[in-house]
Image (cartoon, grey):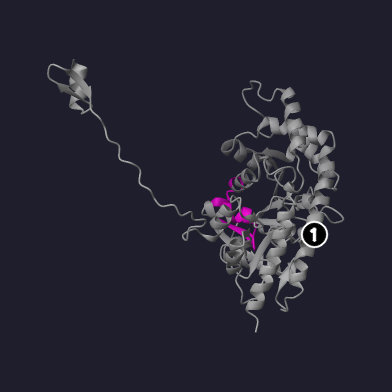
């Protein structure tokens, strides 16, 4: 009876004399209808967020996105590797997985790199959960978030998006045609605002496609040593389709040099966009990176590590890289041939497009008075997405530049989309020519 009285007090039941207690009927207010219009991009989205959302729209061809490993379909191979890796009992009970990653994988990575004359010890390698982990570990290991971080400009959107979210203090150093002048700018920047870390994409830079020569890399090593600056490099040398793989900055550091370099690589670029596994190469930075990794990240997936060990031990990784290089070169050549009929009609001295021997993208400069953001809006209307130049800078104005990719699964939609984009570029430029 006390329970009934309490429910009555709360308004859930009512008493009817000489009949009993009854549950009170509750009327629920219907959820309102907010309209039936579907909006693709909200006006308050920043440009980089709008471009990011376009990646996931099935109606948009994401020429703004780079996923180089997607030019070959490795699903069947990865499924077979997954089943075989389970025989290693990756989920057996251990108190702790190796912080550094499985030794066999670290050994295979150094063996693979030695084929391009890059010599490292397995002890220098730390396995990570992918490139985002790589950058976070590197930044924390170098205590860069407490001060200013220098980056080349334009800079990798991978760097840009993470540093922006971390609210880091950034100083941009514009890329120069003459590398000695670029080092002089670095010195000037360091004098005005000292920094501990320099972020660079030395091989097939995103978005410019630039590859530093060994001479320039060695000059940067000497500069970093003289200024006590740690170099964090994102090495995409594996994506070459020219005559040879460009080496990383770290591979050129002499054993007697105190220069500190952290090299970031991952299997997202080379094996599959669905794989979150990468590694750091630590040159005079191992202890700090190891401690940082142990404190802030979870151990990389053991099953994925066993899969990569099998792939490398059986030399299938080398075969896949050759297929990848061939696929990237074919896609690049085909894409360029589709764009050239439109590009050849653009009569402007300041129109430019990069010509590359690796990587997944082409960097294009419109005539100075035109805007890539305006072109982006025209492209979106045609269900195409490009990456406007302002996405690759914190302060500089690259509004006349934009990046497109040729490294997506090649099909009729890609061919039609790239040809259509060339036509849009030509029409946009011609509409502003007198």
Residue at 60% across, 66% down: 378
Query: Magenta segment: does it hold 144?
Result: yes
Q: Position of residue 173 (x, y in %)?
A: 64, 65
The quarter holding residue 229 reads bottom right
Query: Magenta segment: does it hold 363?
Result: no
Query: From where the camera sits, is residue 183 visible?
Result: no
Find disc 1 in the rendering and name its residue.
Answer: 334
The quarter holding residue 320 reads top right
Q: In this view, does 33 lie to the left or right of 128?
A: left
- Where disc 1 sits, the SS reads helix
Q: Is residue 355 left or right of residue 391?
A: right
Residue at 64% across, 42% down: 289
Query: From where the camera sits, is residue 373 visible?
Result: yes
Residue that lies at the very extreme toward the front in this rendered image: 19
User: Looking at the rendering, in which quadrant would you find the N terminus?
Assistant: top left
Q: Where is residue 368 in the image (x, y as percent from the top left)?
A: 64, 76
Q: In this view, does 28 lie to the left or right of 81?
A: left
What is the magenta range?
A: 140-162
For residue 184, above or below residue 168? below
Residue at 72% across, 56% down: 414
């Amino acid at each position: 009876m006390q329970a009934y009285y309490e429910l009555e007090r709360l308004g859930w039941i009512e008493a009817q004399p000489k009949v009993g207690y009854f549950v009170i009927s509750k009327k629920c207010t219907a959820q309102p209808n907010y309209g039936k219009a579907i909006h693709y991009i909200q006006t308050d989205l920043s440009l980089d967020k709008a471009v990011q959302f376009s990646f996931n729209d099935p109606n948009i061809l994401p020429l703004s996105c780079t996923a180089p490993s997607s030019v070959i379909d490795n699903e069947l191979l990865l499924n077979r590797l997954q089943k075989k890796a389970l025989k290693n009992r990756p989920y057996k009970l251990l108190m702790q997985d190796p912080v550094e990653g499985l030794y066999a994988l670290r050994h295979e990575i150094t063996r693979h790199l030695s084929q391009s004359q890059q010599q490292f010890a397995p002890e220098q390698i730390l396995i990570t959960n992918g490139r985002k982990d790589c950058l976070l570990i590197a930044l924390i290991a170098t205590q860069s978030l407490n001060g200013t971080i220098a980056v080349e400009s334009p800079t990798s959107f991978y760097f840009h998006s993470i540093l922006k979210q971390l609210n880091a203090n950034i100083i941009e150093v514009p890329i120069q045609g003459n590398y000695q002048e670029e080092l002089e700018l670095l010195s000037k920047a360091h004098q005005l605002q000292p920094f501990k870390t320099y972020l660079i994409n030395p091989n097939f830079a995103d978005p410019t496609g630039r590859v530093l020569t060994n001479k320039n890399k060695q000059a940067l090593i000497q500069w970093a040593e003289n200024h006590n600056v740690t170099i964090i490099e994102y090495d995409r040398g594996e994506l070459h389709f020219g005559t040879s793989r460009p080496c990383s900055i770290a591979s050129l550091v002499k054993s007697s040099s105190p220069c500190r370099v952290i090299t970031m690589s991952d299997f997202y670029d080379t094996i599959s966009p669905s794989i979150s596994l990468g590694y750091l190469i630590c040159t005079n930075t191992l202890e700090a990176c190891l401690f940082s990794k142990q404190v802030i990240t979870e151990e990389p997936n053991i099953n994925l590590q066993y899969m990569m060990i099998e792939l490398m031990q059986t030399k299938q990784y080398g075969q896949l890289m050759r297929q990848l290089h061939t696929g990237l070169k074919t896609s690049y050549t085909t894409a360029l041939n589709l764009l050239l009929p439109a590009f050849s009609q653009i009569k402007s001295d300041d129109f430019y497009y990069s010509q590359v021997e690796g990587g997944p993208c082409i960097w294009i400069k419109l005539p100075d008075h035109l805007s890539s953001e305006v072109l982006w809006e025209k492209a979106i209307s045609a269900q195409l997405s490009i990456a406007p130049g302002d996405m690759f800078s914190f302060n500089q104005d690259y509004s006349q530049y934009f990046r497109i990719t040729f490294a997506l699964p090649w099909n009729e939609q890609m061919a039609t989309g790239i040809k259509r984009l060339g036509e849009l570029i030509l029409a946009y430029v011609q509409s502003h020519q007198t």
